Amino acid sequence: RQQFSAAENIQMSLYGRDFLRDAARLLSVHHPDHDDVVDVQFREHGYLFLSSSLEGKRQLEQNHRLQKSLGCRDHVLLTPLQLKERFPWLNVEDILLGSYGAKGEGWFDPWALIRGLRAKCLSLGVEIVDGGFPVSAVRNCDGGNNGNG
């Protein structure tokens, strides 16, 4: 989802959304006899945030302005009447405003994503070490050392 109040979170979410949309291509691994296609099952069904207080309404409006300025195109603010029209089952008696992201927000299969990332990394020559021991330092390509080691 992109409905955050911090620019960094919104930008990371936009990147993540685009990555998930293109995961099949980005994580594909070519084998001589077949290609592994990753389906992370990204389902863009949206998120709905509701406010029943004036403070919450102002926060949704402020967040919405920031989200739009950063490129969130599929988000709308909805009045109680608009909410009732779109979601007839929703009780809007105490709702002042809703924020709805119809696309780019939803859910995916995290296990499929992890498996796809692992397979892609292995295909690119990454060595994955399973040793049950904690990492104490990471050495940079230039020989520099990050961490405590």
Image (cartoon, rainbow, N blue to C red):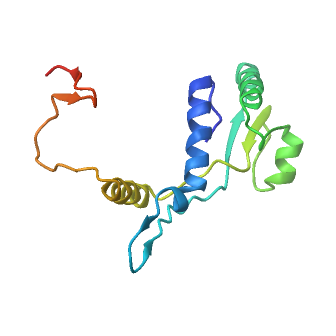
Q: Is residue 126 left or right of residue 59?
A: left
In the current view of this chain or complex, which residue is farthest to the front?
Answer: 142
- Up-down: is 26 above or below 147? below
Q: Is residue 1 above or below residue 62?
A: below
Left or right: where 7 falls relative to 87: left
Residue occupying the far bottom of the picture: 33
**Picture residue at 38% right of the left edge, 57% below the top:** 120
Q: How many marks?
A: 0
* Residue 46: x %, y % from top left: 67, 50
Q: Position of residue 123 (x, y in %)?
A: 34, 59
Q: Quadrant of residue 88?
A: bottom right
Which quadrant of the view contains residue 149? top left
Name which residue lies at 35% across and 54% down: 124
Residue sitting at x 86%, y 37%: 79
Residue 27 screen position, x and y as percent: 46, 58
Asked whether the viewer can see residue 36, the reply is: yes
Quarter of the figure that contains the N terminus: top right
